[in-house]
Amino acid sequence: MAIKKGARQPARPRKRPAVARTAPPAADKPETTETAGPPQASPESLAPTVHDATFEELVRHVAAELPQLEDEQALQPFPWPRVPVRRSGIYTRRLGPLGRSSLGADEETTAANEDGQPEDVEAALGAAPAGFLPARTSEELRVDVDGLYPTMTISGTIYRLFGGRLTWIARVTKNPSTGDYAGPISYRDGTSGLEPHTQIRCKITGSWWQPTSLRAHVTFTGGGVRKQTRIYKYQRANFRDVGIEYDTVEGTPSVTSYNLHAHPNRPADLPSTTLSIEDVFTRLGLRMTNTNGNNPIPISEAGANARWSDLEMHDAMQRHWSRWADVPQWQVWTLFAGQHDMGPSLGGIMFDDIGTAQRQGCAVFMNSFISNPAPAGDPAPAAYVQRMRFWTAVHEIGHTFNLAHSWQKSLGTPWIPLSPEPEARSYMNYVFNVAGGANAFFADFYHRFSDEELLFLRHAPERFVQHGNAPWFDHHGFEQARASGEGALGLELRFRRETRMFQALEPIVAEIKLKNTSAVPVVVDRNALLSEDVVIVIERQGREPRQWLPYQRYCTIAEPHVLEPGKSIYAQLYLSAGLNGFDLAEPGRYHIYAALRTDVGDVLAAPVEIRISPFASREQEFLADELLDEEVGRTLAFGGSRVLDQARITLENVVDRMPDSRIGMHAAAALGAVAAKPGLVLEEVNGVMRLEIEQARPAQAEPLLDVAYQDLDTAADTFGHIRLTEQVTGATVALAEEGDEQYATELTVRLADTLEHRGVLAEVVSDVRGMAQTMSE
Amino acid sequence: MGALAIALEAGFDDDHVIVQVDDRVVLDEDGVSTRYQIGLARMLEAPVTEGSVQVAVRLPERGLTGATTVEVDDTHSLRIWIENGELVFHASDTPPFYA
């Protein structure tokens, strides 16, 4: 679907609780097509796409050529790399603040004792910077030792909250007697101290036919530090996950697949199958998925000359690409167009070397030399043309991954020392520049990238390869991550109250603020503060730190937002409870740490110290047992519930017994919010489950809201400005709709006055006053 | 009267480049850089008559100069690039292709 620039996008499922079901992962789709079944050469394999109407004639020509080719291929052996056992792919390992692995305790114990030596996992991962005790570490291991064109490489990336990240790479060989893979760590990028060892040995256990059982046991040695074995759990076969969208200029054909046997000049053992562009990348370990789109683009967008400039294509990309965002993302846009301003000499171009997030778009020009007729006497002239077009498309898409031409590998600053490969049979070589020309090239071309290119695609630090990240050709992707945002953002965790002393049982609501502290605009994800990239660690004095895991996370697409200098985005965080339980419940002193993981590193907030008062009465102690309950925690965190009856009873009890306490205000707010507005409840009626409307109960709501918000200044202290504003306006809008405009208006006006008095941003106060005005009309 | 396609390819980096065909300047431009995704910095077409012409290239700020004689009748394009600090000329009877 095309999204017009500046137009409002159609509704998307922006908010999705973490527990929401999602579609089955595309990983379920078989990865390889090359080992499948009988020869498939057929006219259908060259069927036109919806934009290929004018291509039908070419298809008919190819179809006419195919019968004799099928006879030929039937005689061919079928030694295309068959890989019955494939254990390569991504393995992961995570450690929480307590050093607990994502694996079960038994598995981790096994690792620690493998060589009969005690091993300190955290010590081996390097010490955290002084001043930050909590450490949350996650590791990704990329095993590339079998499957199609293995590079015999094992690499890893270590992410450590408050400690940076490191990508390391080891080239390995297989020990035939043990089946282990071993080799030196020959490349590091990032905080080297996170992995000081110099050698690895990897043993893979588990059954390939049951991937969830696969484990990579990696023993790290050398570097003058203690040997260590870590276990990684298999996650998936693909090293990267990329989306692609094809859009086509009206009246222009497109080519997104090619039957490998369509032309007889090819390796004898090339399988008979049709490769789509997505297949080319997916079978090499970079799962590529068509994200649809297929938008016809008016030729008028190319201007009066009907030929495309880079700028016109960039504009078209922004206008028509449904995934357009000026941020790094694993997405690529491909345009099939007629001709570039340069004329027929240019077959295609990765035009997106403009602006900040580069390498997101490329184009293929169908009215260029790539559509030149085959040389006289060619046995399959239509297939010759289609193959050239297909090669061009994959070649340009290869550039978007920051791959240079084969003969340019040593130019610029390659990510590792590289040599030119002028004779490489790679999509990144010019077919007409090798010795013997295009015929020599295709005679020995297996529709792949070179080993060095595969090493880069599978193992280079993500930012060097990912679209929109490192600028084009800058280290073909090395070293210079896009500086946008780096050092330009400040993160603040704060409480909108004079004292950080909290009452016993008082829910603790923090606000988090991301500010552009630089002098230039910075593009950020508008939803960044609601995402899993926000990490909060709570450390009670004298205890191990624990990570706060909220009951819900928002799953959103990247929504670029230009943050002007000095401007901020905000979110509120209900820290008292979460999936980890109640980490801010007991009286005592706490430190709270916050970080936002961004593509250019972690942005850290200054730690905040808070204190929770001792229980003021035995009644409070008694209530604690009831309040520290998951249902109650969820009800307070979500600001109310229509279905958690036990929690409702508990909160009603709190309001009755402690209406003047802070917990009493939170309880009343949650109960009042539900009573103020109608809602849907799933109920069983005559044995059938159906949604019933629960009517609003203003008469019950208003006394509760009085308890919660009678003293709005105190309410602002305990709820924070963001949560208070959301809760009050949510309730008053509902009450106004139920007909109690006077109550709603008065409370909303008092809210605006309170916010103004407390120095809240003028536009927020103005919005609230506007709501009050609307209610009163 | 025909046309000679002159392609400035690899090795140009924000250079001042002057191209002459015989005594006629056909390009005098600052900031010429190779776009490595197509391996090309500039493509120009110079009108030529029959016979031979001399094509000279100068990068004054780098102190680079080079020249070659092209037989117009046999030549469709002239590719020029910088390799190991020297200008390299390659004449061809086919048009150059880029992608």
Image (tube, helix red, strand yellow):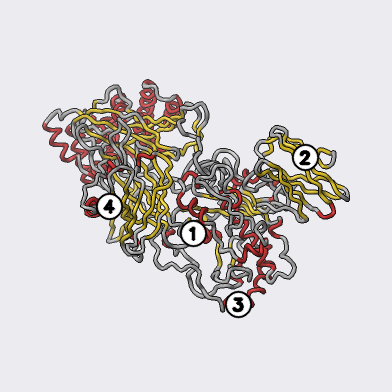
Q: For the residues carrying marks 4 and 3, which lies nearer the camera in this image? A: 3
For badge 3, the amino acid type reads Glu
The chain holding disc 3 is A
- Tag 2 and tag 1 share a subunit: no
Quarter-wise, where is residue A678 in the image?
Answer: top left
Q: Are marks 4 and 3 in contact (CB under 8 Å)?
A: no
- Disc 4 on helix, strand or loop? loop
For badge 1, the amino acid type reads Leu
Q: Are marks 2 and 1 in contact (CB under 8 Å)?
A: no
Which numbered disc, 3 or 1, marks the residue that appears first in the sequence?
Answer: 3
Any part of residue A698 in sight: no
For badge 4, the amino acid type reads Leu
- Tag 3 and tag 1 share a subunit: yes
Rounded to the nearest angstrom, the CA distance separating label 3 from label 1 is 27 Å
- Label 3: how many Cα within 10 Å (few below 14, some 14–19, many 20+): few
The circle drawn on residue A284 is: 1
The circle drawn on residue A535 is: none
Q: Are marks 2 and 4 in contact (CB under 8 Å)?
A: no
Q: Nearer the viewer, residue A308 or B15?
A: B15
The circle drawn on residue A72 is: 3
Q: For the residues carrying marks 2 and 4, which lies nearer the camera in this image? A: 2
**Which residue carries the number 4 mark?**
A103
Q: Nearer the viewer, residue A292 or A677?
A: A292
